[in-house]
Image (cartoon, grey):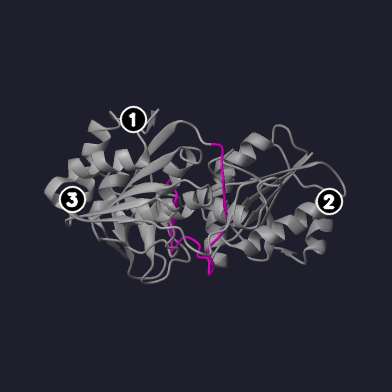
Amino acid sequence: MFALIVHGLSNRVFEETIRLLNYLCRFTDVTCTAVGTSCIKPLHDLGLQNRISFFNHDTMSDAISSLSEQCEAIICYNESKSWESSNRFRSIIKTRITSVRCPVLYIDNHNASYLTDYHHAIFEEILEQVAIKLVDTPLRGDYLVREVHGALVGENIWINGNVVGTVVKPNPIIWKDEDNKIKYDGIKPKEHGLFHVGDFNPIDAKIRTGYSSNQNTRPRCSISNKKPMASLIDHDAEKGVRYSLHVQYAVSIGDDTTKNASSLLYRFSVPIIGITDGDEDGICLEDIRFPGSIVFKVIPGHDDIVGSEISHELFKGATTIENPPSINEMADLIQNLIGDRLVSRYVEPFHSDEQIDSNS
């Protein structure tokens, strides 16, 4: 059996993955999986949930390590912004799979390379089929300093799902000094975001720049199998969405978290109750919420405070609660907590171009 692992945000990379999957299926059984939370956008919008699994593995290196135990060979299909960022991503993966004893082919930016010392005869046929050339670029040996290749001036930079600043010069770097303090060069930090990330290892952290994907039309949403639960997503939408796909509703804290979470959960017909205060960084270009969603705007600087109160008073410190009150009842409880800090309360209406698939 072969494994095909895909990582990317655009419909194009998944369309190419399906073409490669169809080709591989002519020779052997293939298991195909996507990594990264934002993959659910193109997966869902293209209707590929039954062909490509997701949320089985957190990162590409995790997927390789797990699947190498049961597969004859592995092909990784990635989508980087540039060859420099592709090479860096490849370098990081290679350092994390040193114990893998399986042929692994890595395809990115219309180039390919091997991630292990083991090769498979079918790889050359695959590369010829998809018109991709094999290259051998030396890997960097210095991993004490994390250079963010491909980052463009003006882009937001995310660390472990949180926006921590803005890129002010190309290829910024992040490192820890001799006192174990995080240092930056080429980044205008956002202290609020850094607080939510906390301490982290620059080498192992999930770092990316730019935006989540955007759709020109309202995507189709599916009626998912709901559980009698509600979830709390506090400043890390991509992590929170993983345990929120089948809840009755999700409560999200923060402007960007609310916008990103509502965009992802819309596809699974999950409404949100969002707590915002107007300090959006603009990391999500999609502005969609499932009908019935409720967004509270509070006075500036108080979304975190209200979020902490919701966590303590209504969720008792947990990320999910069972048998929750209805979304409107929960919203009323939250509005009582907000009190005179409330600026506005918005309820998302049903739109004429809504595409709800009740058969999914």
Q: Is residue 268 magenta?
A: no
Task: Tell which of 149 and 9 is nearer to you.
Answer: 9
In the picture as drawn, the residue positioned furthest to the right comes out as 27
Cα distance in 3D space between marks 1 and 3: 21 Å
Please tell me whether residue 133 is drawn above or below residue 69 in the rendered image: below
Label 2 vs label 3: CA separation?
A: 57 Å
Q: Amino acid at mark 2?
A: Ile
Whether tag 2 and tag 3 are in contact, CB under 8 A, the answer is no
Q: Nearer the viewer, residue 43 or 294?
A: 294
**Badge count:** 3
Give the label, 2 or 3, closer to the camera. Answer: 3
Tag 1–tag 3 contact (CB < 8 Å): no
Instruction: List x then y, in percent, for residue 120.
Output: 80, 47
User: Mark 1 belongs to which amino acid?
Assistant: Ala
- What is the magenta segment's predominant secondary structure? loop
Q: Residues within 10 Å of mark 1 (few under 14, many from 20)?
A: few
Q: Secondary structure at mark 2?
A: helix
Name the spot of residue 182 as percent of width and height, x first: 29, 49
Q: Secondary structure at mark 3?
A: loop
Query: Disc 1 or disc 2, which is closer to the eye?
Result: 1
Residue at 30 percent across and 61 percent down: it is 280
Please tell me whether mark 1 sits on a helix, a strand or a loop: loop
For marks 2 and 3 on the same chain, the one whose residue lies earlier in the sequence? 2
Give the residue pinned by disc 2. Answer: 122
Quarter in which the C terminus is drawn: top right
Magenta-highlighted residues: 203-225
Quadrant in which residue 219 is drawn: bottom right
Q: Which residue is mark 1?
A: 318
Q: Residue at x 69, y 61 (%)?
A: 15
Q: Which residue is mark 3?
A: 302
Q: How far from the left and from the top, in percent, is residue 54?
A: 60, 43
